[in-house]
Image (cartoon, rainbow, N blue to C red):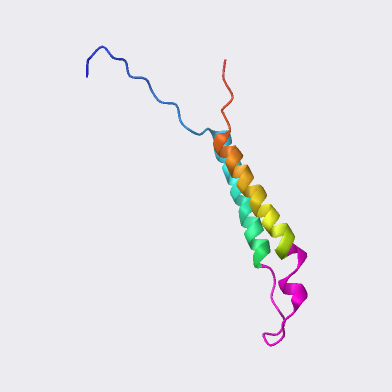
Amino acid sequence: MSKDKKTTALEPLFTKDNYLWMIIGGVIIALGMFLMSGGKNESADVFDYNVVYSKTRITVAPILIIVGLLVEIFAIFKKPKSVE
């Protein structure tokens, strides 16, 4: 290495905004997982179709998980605002 080469400091890969969006996406994913876990049957001997296959478990929770993953992708690819 020659001594005349200048070293430049690397800018951080993610900014505060990126981390904020990552946290938001993580919370949305966790909420979807929580909703998918759902309730329970009153009796272990009886199978209640409406509890196991409710709209919340089958439709809302997977949509929330996918939205959370899309927010995570957005957070990773979001460019920082240029300061001029």
- Residue at point 55%, 38% (across, down): 76
The image position of residue 15, as x and y in percent, is 53, 32
The answer to which quarter of the image holds residue 46 is bottom right
Seen from the viewer's position, the closer of residues 70 and 37 is 70
The answer to which quarter of the image holds residue 20 is top right
The image position of residue 64, as x and y in percent, is 68, 53
Q: Give the residue at the far bottom of this rendering.
A: 45
The image position of residue 38, as x and y in percent, is 68, 68
Figure quadrant of the N terminus: top left
**Residue 39 belongs to the span the image colors magenta:** yes
* Tally of numbered tags: 0
The image position of residue 29, as x and y in percent, is 62, 53
- Residue at point 64%, 54% (across, down): 65
- Residue at point 75%, 76% (across, down): 49
The answer to which quarter of the image holds residue 83 is top right
Q: Is residue 6 left or right of residue 65?
A: left
Seen from the viewer's position, the closer of residues 78 and 58 is 58
Residue range in magenta is 38-56
As displayed, is residue 5 above or below residue 69?
above
Seen from the viewer's position, the closer of residues 4 and 59 is 59
Q: Give the residue at the far top of this rendering.
A: 4
Figure quadrant of the C terminus: top right
Question: What secondary structure do most residues of the magenta stretch adopt?
Answer: loop
**Residue 1 belongs to the span the image colors magenta:** no
- Residue at point 56%, 35% (across, down): 77
